[in-house]
Image (spheres, rainbow, N blue to C red):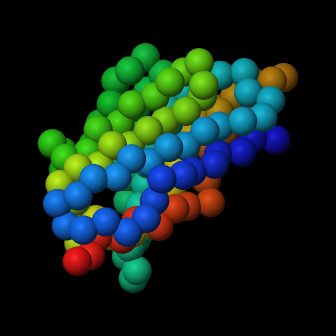
Amino acid sequence: QVQLVESGGGLVQPGGSLRLSCAASGRILSINYMGWYRQAPGKQRELVARVLSGGGDNYADSVTGRFTISRDNARNTVYLQMTSLKPEDTAVYYCNAAVRRLGARRYDDYWGQGTQVTVSS
């Protein structure tokens, strides 16, 4: 079994910063991409940022220049550094990863339980 555990959410004022972390654990052979999605009330879940095992990354237009994704392959951990936060960034943030388990022939998608980020004065 594979688990993704997120941390780092919370309440922050507009213009502030937060750093999210997500650690993958279990019988892991390798991880392809790792990323972050978010879902605001009444809206669909959307991709925020994703980083490949080789380091290539991509961002939603709405966060480009404000958010930075990074990963530590040795720790199977992905980070999301969020700066210049806006009220519209308020959402539940979910970690996502494509993981190949020991003994498996393919990569499967896994999700974390979500962490709330609230941007409000």
Left/right of residue 71 with respect to residue 83 in the rendered view = right
- Identify which residue, 97 or 118, lies in the foreground: 118
> Tag count in the figure?
0
Residue 100 pos. (x, y %): 69, 28
Q: Please name the residue shown 71% across and 45% down the image.
A: 3
**Does residue 55 show up?**
yes
- Identify which residue, 9 or 38, lies in the foreground: 9
In this rendering, the answer to whether 79 lies above or below 17 is: above
Q: Please name the residue shown 73% across and 27% down the image.
A: 28
Left/right of residue 91 with respect to residue 17 in the rendered view = right
Residue 75 pos. (x, y %): 60, 25
Residue 90 pos. (x, y %): 33, 70
Q: Please name the residue shown 44% across and 38% down the image.
A: 79
Q: Please name the residue shown 50% across and 24% down the image.
A: 72
Residue 55 pos. (x, y %): 38, 21
In this rendering, the answer to whether 42 lies above or below 32 is: below
Left/right of residue 83 with respect to residue 104 in the rendered view = left
Quadrant of the rendered image containing residue 42: bottom left
Quadrant for the C terminus, please.
bottom left
